[in-house]
Structure formats: C-alpha cells, structure tokens
Image (cartoon, rainbow, N blue to C red):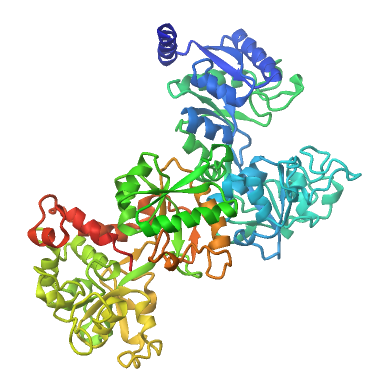
C-alpha cells in the first residue's frame, strides 16, 4: 500500500513539474488509429513534447484515467466537460473553432410557425419535434432549460416521463425502447414505407436537425428544437430536399427566453442556450499552455492541402469527428481554463436542470419538523404521498428547534425544512443551506411575497418624507411583527435614522417617535410611550394588547390608527389600504375612506401613490422556502412537491390530506403556511440572499446592530429570558410572518 502511494506521488510530482510527453486518451479503435498517425506525424515534424496515445474506450473512462494520472488529455463535448469539471476538477485548455461567424459555439433554438401565438410560456400541452434522445440542441438544452426555469418538473428525476406529460405528443428519435413513454415516438414517421419508426438514424425521416424541422414544417409537431442554422439551411431554396422546396424562412420564428418571439435571423439574442464548442481537458495541475503549443504547432503543419496527415479530417479512418470535429477550422487557447466560464451560464443552468438523475436519488427525503402538531401532519403527508406513489418518499425527522433542523441538514442527517424570513437568513448564512422551492400566496402574484410599506395621509401642506419621521406619531401592527415592527425599525436603524443606546431598541423607538401604538409593548420595563396611542376595546379596556380587543392591533388596526389621526404614519403591508377603503370595509370608521387620500413613503425620500407599492416600499417580504443542503438536488425536491400539490394542493382535492391546511391537526401554518396556494420553483433565486432580497436583509441586519454584541440589557433579558440580543432579535423574527 505504501509503495503504491509513493508511485502515485512520484507521478503527481512529475506531471506537475513538466510535460515531457502528452498521453492522449482515445475513445474508440478508429480514434486510436488516428491518434497513432498524429503521434508519428508530430514526431516526424519535430514537434515537442512527444505525443503518446492510450486507449480509454469511452469518454467517461478517459476522464477517470486523466484524474488518476494514467492519461493527460482528451477532447470532450459540453455535457462531458460539465461532468469532468464538476466530478473530477478537470479544466478545458484548448477549444475548437468551427467558423468565423459564431466561433467556438452554436445556439440551441425553439422554432415555431409564424402566427401560431406560441411562446416559451405556453409550450405545455402542445406537440414537439426533437433531433433525438439525449442530443444537445434537440433534447438536453430544451429539457434542461425547461426544468431549470421551473416550467417543467420531473418527479423522481424521470425526465422522459416528465417530457411526455408536458407535451401532448412528440417525435424523439431513439426513445423507442420499452423504458420510454410511447408518446415520445407518437409523431415520428419512419422511412418511406412507414418502417423503422423513431429510429435514431436517417431511416426515420424526422431524425436529426433536418428531420425535427421537417416534423414542424409538415405540421406533425408545433415546435421544433434545433440549432440556429437549421431553418436558413432548409428554406428559401437552399436545399434540394423535396419536402423543403417551398419553405420560406420568413414563415418561421424563434421563441425567446423572455416570452417574446423573434425572426429566425435573431438567434444571437433569441435562443434557449449557447452551446459551447468541444474542448481539450486536462488535470488542474497540467500546464494548458504546453498542450496548446503542441496542438498549435500541429495545426500549422497538418491542417492544409498537401500533407498526408490531416488533423481535422477523419474519412481515412472510416468514421467522423475523431479526436477533433471534422468541421473544426482551428484550435484556440482557452484563457480562463475554467469549465464554468467555457460552458457559459445558459448552458450550465440547463445542465443543472438535467443533473436530476434517478440513479442518484435517495429512497426517502427526510423532512425536519419541530412540534407535536407538525409531526402529526408530516406523518399524514408521508402516508398520503406514498399512496399516490410520489417519489422520493417522505420520512419525518423531529427536532426541538428550527436551528436544530438546520444543523441536522448541514450534517446531512436530515434533508429539508420549511422556513420563513429570518430563519432563511440564519439557515443560509450560518449553516450554508439553499432554497429548493418556495410558497406562493396568490394565484396571480408572481412575486410570492408582499411589501412592507410606510403609509401616510395625503397632505400637500405637510408632505414629510421617510427622513422626517423623528417626532412624528407612529402606528404599528404589533411588537416583533414583520411589516409593522421588524422591517421599519430595522431599516431606520440600518440607515442610522434611529440610533439605539446599549442595544435597547424599544427605548430608542420611544425616544424617536413622539408617541406610538405598538400592541404587545405593554410589558414591564417597556417605555409607556410605545402604548400611548393605543385605545383598547369599546370600553377602553385591554389597551395595547396583541389581540382584536385592541382596536389598533394588526394591519387594519394600525391603518385605523392613521385614518383616525391618532398617528402620522402606519407601518403595514401594501394591501392593507385597499382592503379598508373604497367601500371594501363597511365598518363605520372605514366606510367613507378613499384609497386616493393616502400615500406611501419611499426609501429614497420620495412619496408615491398607494398603487406604486412595487416601486415604493420599505422591503419585499419573502415567502417561506424549503431549505436544503447545497448537495441536495433542488429539482427533485420541487418535482416531488409540484406533483404532490396536483393531488393535495387545494381544498376541494377530494384526496383527504391538504398540504396548505393545518386545522385538522389543531394548529396553524404547520410545515407550509395555511395561506399558501401553491409551491413554486426558486428559478434564479438560488441562494438565501437572492431569495430574501437586499432590502429585507438590510432591515434584518438593522435589528442586529453592531454595538449589540454581548451582554444585552436587563430589559431584554427579563422579557425574553435570553442572554444575547442576537437571540432576542431572531426570536422576534421566528414569529409568523405577518
């Protein structure tokens, strides 16, 4: 064992210090023959370092051999560069160039007939034409992109099943084995006699780029997934093929990622993904410059007429694209030597969507819950999911606190937990967790969140701004509540407008505003000014209580406090004003209120109309998210929950269990919030910072002021029985989002 370690170390040192030879790994016998001829040609021309050829048999074997110092270089396509980079740390050092127009890439596009009114957002339920199963432009990119963008979900990472459920019918040549759903071959045509249907070769008339486009042109399918040059090559008289004789390029258009469409010539800006060219990959310790110099000397001598050996021609070996693509015009050095940079974001994201592999999925997803009621609901959820054969199966893991759940997931002893606001912040910042799916609370709301706003009366003679709040009277939904306390106070502290002394935030607020109503701030040692504006019930009792007995409590109460001129500003959510004006609230105090009589205070010092909350707010309050370990496949988690909500997502599902209802379990907001209407994909918001947004994080960090680092003060210790202010602040945030 010791000897083998020493040999490995010597090989490592030798490879690192110098490249006296480059051992090229080949993936087939024909490629080995060409490589041996290339080695002889290079040696005859005196090109150094020397080139040696070794047999790998497959690209996967070659990447493993390079990692194990048994070979040095191999040429791979995008998918394999992604795998080699992600799994083995290999880097691309030399890239192929195919033509001057697009250089080292081509583009995967979605083509439809002009006038079809189809966009990238309306593909579900239509028929589709593909170049072939697992082909880059015809399968990998469209499927990967649709999964990555949340449009297509794959329960149990079964991508063929997901595609067959998404499109009404398809032609995907090669998807003709018993392992594939029948609808994937439904549109295929076969040969002239109708035989060889769905074969991955030219016997299937709808195979490859030209075939997928023909499938669209002949109205078998409604969308074709091809490359950017396909339509120009088969229209406007460019081809002799009889089926394409009368086709005009102007009768087709491209589907863009943003939901628009474009002319077929606009592929540079309207495409699904840029496909990187093939590249030569090596170990991270290999000097890529040496490999490029070797190949560059070769291409200068063996890429033109009059030489026996041709680097970019494989016809002599009875095959195509050996070592390099035959269409390569030159090789270039890759300066970044980084697989992510070479592949590009569009391609990378599509590959991440495709990375959902059923063979690597765990049998069960361990869901972390923290109360007896949640354990009860989780157990019922696991049973309900199992009855519908949803995968992976749910198993319930119990913990005492949400932080303990985060710790279990960090250690990979649990897999998922549903968290809100400040808990998402802690899970991301402290434990490195990431969002896998989120909640949405309105069917027509794409933001999956609401806005915390500062609401004031319209007053042309006294149009004060956010910077003029000192000395004003304030109305809050309640102590420690999100829109009514945490966000406005955190934001004002972060901006330096409120300056707490000795970490005593309630005292600082009472000194900043001349008077307030902050329901629940009627406890010992809290400044009395925080309850000064509160009015209690009709008899004047229960003043400042955190219940409906205090008429200025919660959203409508804080708004009433403003409407009745008790306060100058109300901290509520954006919908509060609409719910209580223009006849929507028939109570006597609200009956005659008009929404147009109120305005918003913006963070930048402006005022805005109440309808402009999306641009003028204190912070967007994020929805709850399902947080997981970064190694967990988020597409598998969302795929499970999306399929589950088909059965259990609405109140009238008839399947017994209801995901967004906790009343059966004698609780509220168990696992999911009861107000959720659906589980949604995270899309591009893949980190805790992206999910929460900078405004919300600023207000959160405002509540965690730098001077509050250690002992805290007696007021906070007595009220919350904790020893640090950080705990005090996080405890506030743990309360339900408003």
Q: Residue at x 43, y 61 (%)?
A: 672
Looking at the rendering, in which quadrant would you find the C terminus? bottom left
Residue 389 x, y percent position in the rendering: 60, 51
Looking at the rendering, in which quadrant would you find the N terminus? top left
Relative side of 412 to 316, left or right: left
Q: Residue at x 25, y 86 (%)?
A: 460
| Residue farthest to the right, as pictured | 193
Relative side of 546 to 385, left or right: left
Relative side of 236 to 733, left or right: right
Please identify the quarter of the rendering in which residue 411 is found: top left
Residue 29 x, y percent position in the rendering: 70, 17
Q: Residue at x 77, y 43 (%)?
A: 207
Q: Is residue 447 visible?
A: yes
Q: Is residue 145 visible?
A: no
Looking at the image, residue 110 lies above or below residue 333: below
Looking at the image, residue 519 lies above or below residue 172: below
Nearer to me, 539 or 441? 539
Residue 117 x, y percent position in the rendering: 67, 66
Please identify the quarter of the rendering in which residue 693 is found: bottom left
Residue 737 x, y percent position in the rendering: 33, 65
Please identify the quarter of the rendering in which residue 246 is found: bottom right
- Say how many tags the image has: 0
């Amino acid at each position: 064992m010791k000897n083998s370690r020493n040999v490995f170390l010597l090989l490592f040192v030798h490879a690192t210090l110098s490249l006296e030879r480059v051992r090229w790994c080949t993936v087939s016998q024909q490629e080995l023959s060409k490589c041996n001829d290339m080695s002889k040609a290079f040696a005859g021309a005196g090109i150094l370092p020397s080139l040696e050829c070794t047999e790998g048999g497959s690209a996967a074997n070659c990447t493993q051999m390079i990692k194990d110092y048994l070979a040095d270089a191999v040429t791979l396509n995008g998918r394999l560069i992604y795998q080699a980079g992600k799994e083995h740390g290999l880097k691309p050092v030399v890239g192929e160039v195919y033509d001057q127009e697009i250089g080292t890439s081509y583009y995967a596009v979605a083509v439809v007939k002009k006038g079809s009114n189809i966009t990238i957002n309306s593909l579900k339920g239509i028929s589709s034409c593909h170049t072939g199963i697992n082909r880059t432009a015809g399968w990998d990119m469209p499927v990967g992109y649709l999964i990555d963008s949340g449009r297509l979900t794959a329960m149990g990472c079964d991508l063929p099943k997901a595609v067959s459920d998404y499109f009404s019918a398809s032609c995907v040549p090669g998807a003709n084995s018993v392992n594939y759903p029948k609808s994937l071959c439904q549109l295929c045509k076969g040969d002239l006699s109708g035989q060889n249907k769905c074969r991955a070769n030219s016997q299937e008339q709808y195979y490859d780029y030209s075939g997928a486009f023909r499938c669209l042109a002949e109205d078998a399918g409604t969308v074709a997934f091809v490359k950017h040059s396909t339509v120009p090559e088969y229209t406007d008289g460019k081809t002799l093929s009889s089926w394409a004789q009368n086709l005009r390029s102007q009768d087709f258009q491209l589907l863009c990622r943003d939901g628009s469409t474009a002319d077929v010539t606009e592929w540079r800006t309207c495409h699904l993904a840029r496909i990187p060219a093939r590249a030569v990959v090596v170990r991270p310790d290999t000097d890529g410059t040496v490999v490029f110099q070797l190949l560059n000397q070769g291409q200068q001598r063996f890429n033109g007429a009059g030489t026996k050996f041709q680097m970019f021609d494989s016809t002599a070996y009875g095959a195509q694209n050996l070592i390099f693509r035959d269409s390569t015009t030159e090789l270039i050095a890759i300066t970044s030597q980084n697989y992510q940079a070479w592949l590009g974001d569009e391609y990378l994201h599509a590959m991440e969507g495709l990375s959902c592999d059923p063979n690597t999925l765990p049998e069960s997803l361990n869901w972390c819950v923290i109360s007896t009621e949640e354990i009860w609901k989780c157990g019922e959820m696991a049973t309900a999911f199992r009855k519908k054969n949803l995968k992976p199966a749910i198993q319930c893991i119990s913990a005492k606190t949400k932080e303990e759940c985060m710790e279990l997931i960090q250690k990979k002893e649990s897999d998922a937990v549903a968290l809100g606001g400040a808990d998402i912040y802690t899970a991301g910042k402290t434990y490195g967790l990431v969002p896998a799916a989120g909640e949405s609370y309105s069917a027509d709301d794409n933001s999956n969140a609401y806005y915390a706003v500062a609401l004031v009366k319209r007053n042309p003679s006294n149009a004060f701004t956010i910077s003029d709040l000192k000395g004003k009277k304030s109305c809050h939904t309640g102590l420690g509540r999100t829109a009514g306390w945490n966000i406005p106070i955190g934001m004002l502290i972060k901006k330096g407008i409120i300056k707490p002394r000795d970490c005593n935030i309630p005292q600082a607020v009472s000194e900043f505003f001349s008077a307030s109503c902050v329901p629940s701030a009627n406890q010992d040692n809290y400044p009395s000014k925080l309850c000064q504006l509160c009015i209690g019930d009709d008899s004047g009792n229960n003043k400042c209580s955190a219940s409906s007995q205090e008429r200025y409590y919660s959203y409508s109460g804080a708004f009433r406090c403003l409407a009745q001129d008790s306060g100058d500003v109300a901290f509520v959510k954006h919908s509060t004003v609409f719910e209580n004006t223009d006849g929507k609230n028939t109570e006597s105090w609200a009956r005659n209120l008009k929404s147009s009589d109120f305005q918003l205070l913006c963070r930048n010092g402006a005022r805005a109309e109440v309808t402009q909350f999306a641009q003028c707010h204190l912070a967007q309050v994020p929805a709850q998210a399902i947080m997981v370990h970064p190694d967990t496949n988020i597409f598998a988690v969302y795929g499970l929950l999306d399929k589950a909500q088909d059965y259990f997502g609405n109140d009238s599902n008839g399947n017994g269990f209801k995901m967004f209802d906790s009343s059966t379990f004698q609780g509220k907001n168990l696992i999911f919030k009861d107000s959720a209407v659906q589980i949604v994909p995270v899309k591009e918001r893949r980190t805790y910072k992206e999910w929460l947004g900078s405004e919300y994080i600023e207000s959160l960090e405002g509540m965690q002021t730098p001077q509050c680092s250690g002992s805290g003060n007696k007021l906070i210790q007595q009220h919350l029985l904790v020893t640090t202010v950080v705990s005090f602040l996080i405890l506030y945030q743990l309360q339900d989002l408003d």
